[in-house]
Amino acid sequence: MTLRSACIRLPFLLALVVTVSSCTALEQLTALQRVDFALNSTTGTEIGGVPLTSLQNYSDLNAVQLLQLGSAITRGELPLELTLMGDATNPEGNATSARLVNFDWTLFLDDAETVSGSYNNETLLPIGQTVGIPLDIRLDLVQFFGSNLPDLVEVALAVADLGGSSKEVRLQATPSINTALGPIRYPGAITVLKADVGGCS
């Protein structure tokens, strides 16, 4: 092979690699868009440091817990902390596995935008399998819902799906996938989770 033919062939091979990599990236992006995300459960739910696992409504709080939450309100804050356990299912009909590098997310409650964060654990979503994705959430209820303690407890119970009044939880995300060309970010935010939670059973 002459030097000239090698020089001509090299750009062709590079273009071929880029084309194949781009097609693979497009397939993964398409696969990721078809992944079904669902809320599985919530864990580790606390409001102002008070665990909510044994509560169903505001009247279940004891005197010590009410004092603790009231003190937080006087400081102008009432943090809700929990882990949303999501399930990501890559359907059988997808052509390829999807490798999620990370995604930036925003949490909406009844269409009200609240907090944002990032999920940074690279996760493989094989075809036909469901993979758990935990998201750690910290939300200052006073900042978004005022300072009425009974109302804030109801919001917290609803988000934790333990009771309270029904709320719609929606999670929008802008995912990135890993490709031979490096991480590629999805062109826009997509709704990966939408569920009605809370309400008396």
Image: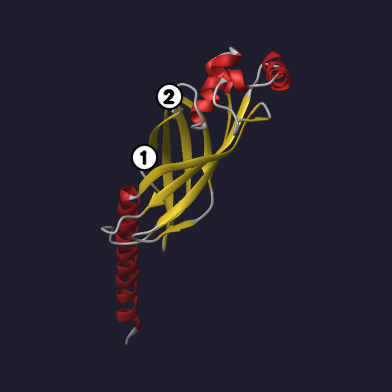
Residue 39 location, quadrant = top left
Residue 82 location, quadrant = top right
Please give left or right for residue 102 compared with residue 64 in the image: left
Residue lying at the far bottom of the rendered structure:
1
Q: CA distance from mark 1 to mark 2?
A: 29 Å
Locate the N terminus and report the quarter of the image it occupies: bottom left
Which residue is nearer to you in this view: 5 or 67? 67
Across and down, in percent, residue 170 comes to 41, 32
Disc 2 target residue: 166
Across and down, in percent, residue 111 comes to 40, 24
Q: Secondary structure at mark 2?
A: loop
Locate the C terminus and report the quarter of the image it occupies: top left
Which residue is nearer to you in this view: 7 or 159? 159
Q: How many marks?
A: 2
Q: Amino acid at mark 2?
A: Ser
Disc 1 target residue: 188
Across and down, in percent, residue 100 comes to 44, 54
